[in-house]
Image (tube, rainbow, N blue to C red):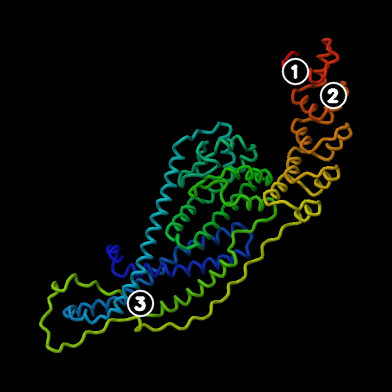
């Protein structure tokens, strides 16, 4: 394995291997410190800055460790090389005095570090290939299947850019290759809007999503995202790096959400927009898209309560970090206070190539090789301290308790978010129950979306109708109002079923149409005959 790193200077592989080993406890200590600091902060801006600084320190730790170990190795390597050159005339004789046990131990100590460095380089190559693929995808998005926006929408984007105080030149296009609005480019940013967003979002929702992308440009998030990808590629083997980087992405989206809400001023519409694009999740990490991070936690934070625990470490993970930190302190104490064992100079290729001068009959024995026993023995390790307990999860607000008191208990996270977004209040639930209906959670959400009010239900009952929940929703969708029902009843159609009222409203059977048909002498037509005439465009 050592032959594979012949292109590196002597001792670099050993120094690099120990740098990777020391980073295990260094990154664990930084992650634990980050967890404790962010436990006392609720502002996404503060948490984002702390996460970026933590990731930057994680990137600097291996560099500082490598420089420190490399300087100590060179300081200890000079005398060893000098003594090695002095012993060259007796190499052929002294090599036989090296015991097999010491030689095997030396090869093992060097070999496992070499394997670590080898797999580290292999992992970097794999992740660098993945990052290259993402860059190729971005270039494809930049060049293929993009179309300019309509003039009205482009002017609206420029107005939003001015309101968001983004003074950089930004270009806007619609693309068929993206599934959610995204930003590409570092120095010449482009905002890509998918066709699904142009057709599936309301104007207010689309504006909020565009401001979210402009916030990424204003905050220079593309450069931080590039730095994250580089750190994840080089320090891929440590889980704490991925966790802190994920926290950066989560808090970055929260910061942009706050900017979008502050510019557009409508939390509900923006939360609905996020709820709609939750199914449009197919974005590579190199892009900054509106559907990044956890949409459930973002929606929950926007609408006023945090039912989803923030990005945290489980108790087992905290214990592992604590053990790694304690072990790392002991490892650093024994390694940094001991003499760095330099690698032996490379042996000559063969004995005949070395000219050995004539030696006296009784030459002095060569100096024994330096072994691990010459180094100062480390102190016995102290028991690792227990990590601090994780902060308590945030409790839900009174909204959930009020829903429980109104009779709603069995709902999941998605249903709770939908209830809050659609404005299903406990008072609304009680009023629907008092009207004689016990809808499911999904039916209750659908009723609130279609504006099925208790007053509407009472008006239908006053008209002599007793619809089911599905019929209520269908009547509101087709705009079957109590006034329309009374008008048909006054026109002589008093015994219609609910489905017939819906069919009449769909085919636009109005009192004016009925009078028009009767004015031509058709006075005793049934509703089915009226529907047939309307469908055939006779009148």
The quarter in which the C terminus is drawn is: top right
Image location of residue 123, percent across then percent down: 40, 58
Q: Is residue 388 above or below residue 271?
A: below
Residue at 67%, 49% in the rendered image: 414
Q: Which residue is mark 3?
A: 340
Whether residue 200 is visible here, answered yes or no, is: yes
Whether residue 165 is visible here, answered yes or no, is: no
Nearest the viewer among 394 and 102 is 102
Q: Which mark is residue 160?
A: none
Q: Which residue is mark 2?
A: 488
Image location of residue 399, percent across then percent down: 76, 53
Residue at 72%, 58% in the rendered image: 396
Q: Tag 2's secondary structure?
A: helix
The quarter in which the N terminus is drawn is: bottom left
Image location of residue 141, percent across then percent down: 46, 40
Image location of residue 468, percent across then percent down: 80, 37
Residue at 23%, 82% in the rendered image: 97
Mark 1, other Cα within 10 Å: few <14 / some 14–19 / many ≥20: some
Q: Tag 1's secondary structure?
A: helix
The residues tagged by marks 1 and 3 sit, at their Cα atoms, a distance apart of 96 Å
Q: Is residue 131 above or below residue 482?
A: below
The residues tagged by marks 2 and 1 sit, at their Cα atoms, a distance apart of 16 Å
């Amino acid at each position: 394995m050592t032959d594979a790193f012949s292109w590196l200077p002597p001792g670099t592989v050993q120094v690099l291997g120990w740098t990777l080993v020391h980073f295990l406890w260094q990154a664990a200590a930084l992650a634990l410190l980050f967890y404790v600091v962010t436990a006392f902060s609720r502002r996404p801006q503060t948490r984002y800055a702390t996460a970026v600084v933590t990731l930057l320190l994680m990137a600097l730790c291996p560099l500082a460790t490598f420089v420190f170990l490399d300087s100590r190795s060179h300081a200890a390597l000079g005398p060893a090389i000098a003594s090695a050159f002095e012993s060259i005339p007796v190499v052929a004789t002294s090599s036989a005095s090296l015991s097999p046990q010491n030689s095997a131990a030396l090869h093992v100590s060097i070999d496992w570090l070499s394997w670590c460095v080898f797999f580290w380089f292999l992992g970097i190559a794999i992740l660098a290939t993945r990052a290259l693929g993402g860059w190729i995808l971005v270039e494809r998005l930049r060049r293929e299947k993009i179309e300019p926006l309509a003039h009205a929408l482009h002017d609206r984007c420029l107005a939003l850019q001015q309101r968001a105080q983004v003074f950089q030149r930004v270009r806007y296009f619609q693309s068929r290759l993206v599934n959610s609005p995204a930003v590409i480019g570092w120095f010449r940013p482009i905002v890509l809007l998918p066709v699904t967003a142009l057709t599936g979002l309301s104007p207010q929702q689309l504006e909020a999503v565009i401001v979210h992308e402009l916030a990424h440009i204003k905050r220079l998030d593309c450069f931080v995202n590039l730095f994250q990808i580089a750190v994840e590629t080089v320090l891929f083997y440590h889980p704490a790096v991925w966790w802190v980087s994920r926290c950066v992405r989560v808090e970055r989206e929260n910061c942009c959400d706050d900017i979008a809400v502050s510019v557009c001023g409508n939390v509900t519409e923006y939360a609905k927009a996020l709820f709609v694009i939750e199914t449009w999740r197919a974005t590579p990490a190199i892009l900054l898209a509106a559907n990044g991070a956890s949409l459930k936690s973002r929606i929950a934070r926007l609408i006023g309560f945090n039912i989803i625990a923030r990005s945290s470490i489980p108790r087992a993970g905290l214990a592992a970090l604590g053990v790694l930190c304690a072990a790392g302190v002991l490892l650093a104490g024994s390694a940094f206070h001991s003499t760095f064992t330099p690698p032996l100079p490379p042996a000559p290729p063969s004995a005949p190539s070395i000219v050995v001068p004539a030696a006296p009959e009784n030459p002095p024995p060569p100096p024994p090789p330096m072994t691990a026993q010459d180094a100062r023995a480390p102190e016995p390790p102290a028991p690792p301290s227990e990590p601090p307990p994780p902060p308590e999860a945030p409790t839900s607000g009174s909204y959930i308790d009020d829903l429980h008191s109104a009779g709603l208990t069995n709902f999941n996270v998605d249903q709770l978010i939908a209830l809050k977004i659609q404005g299903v209040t406990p008072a609304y639930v009680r009023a629907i129950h008092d009207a004689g209906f016990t809808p499911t959670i999904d039916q209750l959400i659908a009723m609130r979306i279609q504006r099925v009010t208790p007053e509407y239900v009472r008006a239908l009952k006053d008209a002599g109708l007793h619809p089911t929940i599905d019929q209520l929703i269908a009547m509101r969708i087709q705009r079957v109002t109590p006034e329309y029902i009374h008008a048909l009843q006054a026109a002589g159609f008093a015994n219609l079923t609910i489905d017939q009222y819906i069919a009449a409203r769909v085919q636009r059977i109005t009192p004016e149409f009925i009078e028009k048909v009767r004015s031509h002498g058709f006075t005793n037509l049934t509703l089915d005959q009226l529907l047939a005439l309307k469908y055939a465009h006779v009148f």
